[in-house]
Image (tube, grey):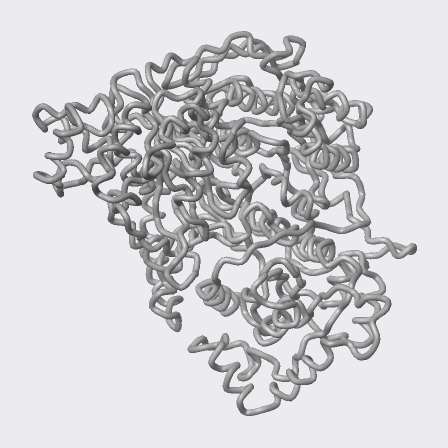
Amino acid sequence: MLNQQLRSQLRTSRRTQLHAPTCSAAACPSSRQPVVQRHLVPQPCPAPPQQVPPRHRTVASAARGRPKSPAPPPEPEGPEEEPFDDAGEYEYDEEEDEGEGDEFVEQLDPLGRKLLGIQQPAEVDEDDEEYEEYEEGELEDEGALLDEAAEADRDGLEPDEDVGEPSTSYPEPPDREYLASDLFGEAGYLDVALWLASTHPDVTVAGVQSNPRLVIPGDVYVLHDWLVPAITDLEAVGVALGQGATVIVLPKLPEDHEGPDPIDELLEAARQYAASEEGAAARQAMIGEVEPDEDEEEGAVIDVENVPVVVRVDDVVAAGSRLAAAFYEAPARELLTVGVLGQAGKTTTSWLIRGILEEMGQTVGTSTSIEHAIAEDRLDEDGYLWEPLEEDPSAERESSVPFKLIPYKGKYRQIYGDALPGLNLQKLLGGMRDRGAGVAVVELEQAASFLGTYDYLDMNVAVVTHLAPVMGVPLAQQPQDRLEAARPYASLAVETLAAQLRDAATQALVVNADDPLSDELLKRLDGAVPYVTYGVLNSKADVFAESIKSNIWETEMIIRTPGGRLQIIVNLLGSHNAANVLAAVATGVALKAPLASIVAGIEAVEVPGRSEVLDEGQAFSVVVDSARTPEALEAMLDALRQGGAKQIFTVFGCSGNEDASLRPRMGSVAHAKSDYVILTNENPRWEDPAKLVSDIVAGFPDDLVNKYSIYAYPPFQDQGRTPLWFEPYLQKAQRDNKRYVMEDRYSAIRAAIGTAQPDDVVLLAGKGEQDWVEHVGEQGELLRGWLDDRVEARNALSKLKYLEQIPKLNRSTLPWGNKIELLMETLVADAGVVSKAGGFVDTGAD
């Protein structure tokens, strides 16, 4: 079997060849005992966090993150000698999970004993300063050695594969290897295990993979037929076969299928190819210059006769989850796991909970729509520490450039998006656990929930943000069309929680008391586990906001909890974000966290692209938010207005190849609640940007649009799409109504920021944490370029001082200038000051 170094290098090589698939699935053994007792244990004094740009990381006021001293490595991997009882059921050994820390835990109440048993980090010794000096020097010496080792390890890799270096601050994951029969047995597939033991007793497994392009020798490949839509199932199997899979898991053939198995012909061709000289040469090319370990026999890198074993099962998605859970020894059983689900607010709530736990000195693993991570380090979707595989062309740039795409390379990406397979969820949890995490915070994506991704996820605390479409409105008064649309997900969430929340000693529920569907959820659970309620409107909630005061920069909340009142100040604006803060506080209450840790942890967090306030010393506020639905945009605009915004500049667009019915509703909300509206590109993809704009404009009032029906061209479009002679008419119509169209987002952001006055707010809505934009290429291909609203806004703010030096330039409205004629003269005379799109153009001055 391949050694760990070779597997790691082949895995890296595979990822450099991967081009954006999609995804999804489920997770763990079917026969299982209730979750065993587990609790947070004290960890060594944590090292100070790395200095990371705030646009993608929590910002803490206290030391947190990974421990200085790595946790001890896990026990040797491999299946138990006798994993089955007499009845043929898989047995988990609960005794091995009990023990350390029991004496302390017994002093707590039942929920505290079983659920958490929080213990604060050990107090600092008198010798602590001396110890820290020793650690610092030791790390410097180690760093030099590691640099040399990294240089040596990169031998044999292509030049574009060695960008960045993996973290060495965590224990190395164990090198796992199973007999295929043992792995399937532990996953609960007893018939398959017996068949493999009798017919293929020597087949081994060293990994589990859902994407055929990422298979490396020794992997089990589990077919997910939606994962790589560009190829057929048979082609996917061929890719996995060619890359060294030892076992391939496929769905069972239909009962009415006649004739031979179509895979048999493929396997026979593989056998013949493996025996040929061409096949031997191809294997050597795949391995490249990587040499086997000295301990390995020459030629043992890939067994030329090792054509995969094919296993067919009823449900491949569940099989992938169960196999991965068995391979990584059910990682969720050893983690305290917090799951966050609901219609909205999941990402923000997850990050706030993460902040609380990190404030308590825990090493936290997270899986959210923004990133998968352990402490301050990101993980890829196979649970490995992420590192860039190529140079980032934007690394040295202050911003993007107008009307051009800067290639999106060398950046963190979630390949599977909101449809993470359950197999990969288990790999992520395994990667967190192997590297010393004691807690996992998992955002349960709505799309992935329907795919069964979380069917085998053990949760200690389930946090439900809300299931009904409108908060605080009685069920009978909910908009029926939206209620019906929300019902399938709400029903799935209720059934999932009813199936998973069974142990009152080790599990708890956090639920929104303002949600009209919360009563249905609590009735369905029927007291199976303790619960904590929270609410912005319902004063009977356990955690209640007695006071919420907002301005255009921050929100101050006075919160009543069972343990006392809290004052929390955050830069999250609006009642919807206040509800997210309350959800995090309620989770802290459920976990018996100290109130001081709850406050400090929440206040230390800045959630990327979620009501993210950019403060560069300007007299107005700039807010970046991911509002992509009419409801989210309305909530954000209401929050800004209630916070005292003098004028609101809303810059937004709608993505192509997504729900077109949202576009006029977005336009209607923006028009009704904004002083200035600038329509721009979000991600046009394969749709014409002009068509997206016209769909949004359809939401403007009819009398506004019809006023210009006699014009030769519609005035509410980008002026670059009309003849030069029409530009003054278009500009006057847009200026009179303060409704502008600038398809180039670079220009739109600068136009809004350059026009804002003291106490105004510029809202950059839609993209949030996304640092990319997608357009169609000349050949019909989808192109992704670098564009980050936060980077663009900060760059524009830094250039305000140059605008102020331009004499007699009136920037109180758009287009800039004292009148249209003056603007047109300026366009001709000095194109370096004002662009045709009305945005500031960097003249090169710093």
Res 105 quadrant in image: top right
Residue 37 in percent (x, y) is at 72, 35
Horizontal and vertical percent position of residue 161: 38, 64
Residue farthest along the right direction in this orientation: 87
Q: Is residue 176 visible?
A: yes
Residue at 78%, 32% in the rendered image: 503
Pick the front one: 696 or 178 = 696
Residue under the image location 39 percent in, 73 percent down: 156
Q: Is residue 846 left or right of residue 779?
A: left
Work out whether 449 lies above or below 199.
above
Who's the residue at 67% across and 9% down the image? 540
Q: Residue at x 81, y 27 (%)?
A: 524
Left or right placement of residue 156 versus residue 350 in this view: left
Q: Position of residue 245 (x, y in %)?
A: 63, 71
Q: Is residue 108 above or below residue 201?
A: above
Q: Is residue 176 left or right of residue 549?
A: right
Residue 119 picture quarter: top right
- Of residues 153 and 834, the one nearer the viewer is 834
Total numbered circles: 0
The one nearer the camera, 680 or 30, is 680
Q: Position of residue 471 (x, y in %)?
A: 62, 20
Q: Quadrant of the N terminus?
A: bottom right
Residue that lies at the very extreme toward the bottom in this rendered image: 277
> In the figure, residue 418 lies in which quadrant?
top right
One can see residue 117 in this view: no
Q: Note whether 513 is above or below 349 in the view shown.
A: above
